[in-house]
Amino acid sequence: MDTATTPSAPPAARPGGADADSARAWEELVTSALLGTDRRPPTGPTTSGTAQDVPGALLDAAALHTVRRRAGLRPGPAAPPPERAPEDPRGPLPAAARVRLDQLLAGRAAPSPAGRRGAAPDVAELLPQWLALANELGYRAPPATLPALLDAARARTDLRPQALRLAGPRGLWLARLNPEWKFALRGTGAGGRLPSTEDPKEVRALWDEGLFAERVALLTAVRTRDAAAGLALLASTWPTERAEDRLMFLDSLRTGLSDADEEFLEAALSDRSRNVRSTAAELLSALPASALAGRMAGRAATCVGLDRTAGSPAIVVEAPHECDAAMQRDGLAATPPTGRGERSWWLGQLVEAAPLSCWPARFGGRRPEDIVALPVADDWQAELHAAWCRAAVRQRDADWSRALLGSPAAPPATGPGTSSLAERAQLLSMLPTDERACWVASFVAAHGLSEAFQLLGVCAVPWDEPLGAAVIDALDIARDAGSYPWSFSGVMGLAERCLDPAAAHRLESLTALPDETEDTAPGAGGYWSEAFRRLVSTLRLRAAMRAELLAERSV
């Protein structure tokens, strides 16, 4: 048999002597095992006895030789020890908070029978809040929890920024020793690996030599501290960057975007990549004083105006008849999506990119709320108002957002400028947090919770008192209606994470099992009681978590 197809001799074997004999015996055993004892009977003690005993004897001999081989191996040179873990100057967690972190990292409580969630809090869903508060207070993770913390960050990308921040430099040191945690060493997850933005030499070195994700994270960090320095860094290598990289780098300019970026962005309108040109145009349109915004305002003014021939004020629209080369250079896409008309597609892009400040003068000095209240001729209202909504979000204009939202008491589908709750949610995010909460509270009071989920998601946490009270009242009304709580499970989940823990006392009365009537779904009261008990226990757990983290601060 060709020995090249058989396993090699033991590593410790040497020519001649006992080691050579052992190696030859091992080769004989391997060859007999591969070919079969009938075709290649082994030599030595295994040949004694009947033919039926030979296979068993061969295996016994192989076991014996295996032990001999392992016992005879000589230790290799020791690997160099890893570098010492860096120091983390942040303070340690209070004792109770350390125990709580272990519980949160262990995951949610065991599910109740029949697949029901039961009344126990879902502790895994509280981990993001705990991490955020611990980082806000400047704590470091206990060394023993670092493996579990990195495993949690690997499994849930939403946890990564906060988990890696808590893990700190020791977490990154540990991540370098395990390939499963290599995600922590990439991009924004590298956290502590980024040089100080005040060290130009280190910044330059990483920008020239770093991985792409590290460079994106670095550019964002530099832009946050010094927008002009970030722009200069990007401009220094812009001509040599790949198109897909230029797109991501350009998107980083949203951080600290100002009129000082206009010259660079205007040049990017001539980029060879269509996506880069489109992003540059979008950023320029978010600068109302830019030349591109002025060009868009002029084009939009030729398409939308006040109909002075009608008996009462109205808006008249004449959509563009072509999308010329100049319009395409300024970011307009000439080809509409499937099912969309060309002219309406071009109109929407023009109005979206035009500065909202151009419209009051165009409509006789009217305020935004008066403009959106005007009727629009020839069924152009939906297209026009949708474009204004996108413009308000892009330009972060609170006045236009407020006008397009309209009254929260208006039915969701009939708002002055919105056709979907998703649009309303985007407009709400442009308002101050207290005004946002009051608007959503009024919406919930008027329409209940069935269509409020997206709107609740953009409100600051914990919810302000008007909003929290409105949600609790709406849940009480839904329970009294006698249906099952399953359609409100999303809102219940939000309430567990977003209600102020002080609201727990208001919910106590809702945990009792309600009386069932003829109109009540069978068993619905029990499900509601369980859901409210879970909500109360979760709020109390959140309060306890906060108290544990603040314990040593109040001493």
Image: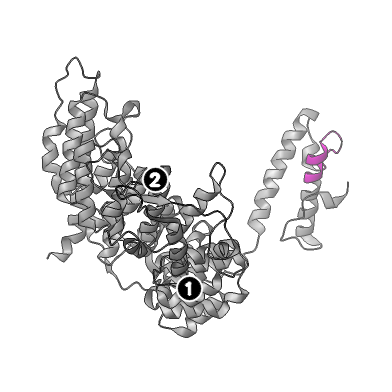
Residue 367, given in percent of the width and then of the height, sits at 26, 59
Mark 1 burial class by Cα count in 10 Å: few <14, some 14-19, many 20+: few
Q: Is residue 69 left or right of residue 343?
A: right
Q: Which residues are magenta?
A: 29-43
Looking at this view, is 333 or 507 the one in front?
A: 333
Position of 148 relative to 47 (above/below):
below
Residue 20, given in percent of the width and then of the height, sits at 79, 58
Picture disc at residue 461: none
Q: Is residue 533 left or right of residue 319?
A: left
The three-letter code of the residue at mark 2 reads: Ala
Residue 174 in view (yes/no): no
Residue at (42%, 76%) from the top-left corner?
Answer: 222
Looking at this view, is 312 or 486 the one in front?
A: 312
Q: Is residue 190 left or right of residue 520?
A: right
Residue 479 in view (yes/no): yes
Q: CA distance from mark 2 to mark 1?
A: 73 Å
Q: Which residue is mark 1?
A: 83
The reply to whether the magenta stretch includes residue 102 is no
Picture disc at residue 377: 2
**Local SS, label 2:** helix
Residue 276, given in percent of the width and then of the height, sits at 56, 65
Figure disc tally? 2
**Local SS, label 1:** loop
The three-letter code of the residue at mark 1 reads: Glu
Earlier along the polypeptide chain: callout 2 or callout 1?
A: 1
Q: Residue furthest right?
A: 1
Looking at this view, is 165 or 53 the one in front?
A: 165
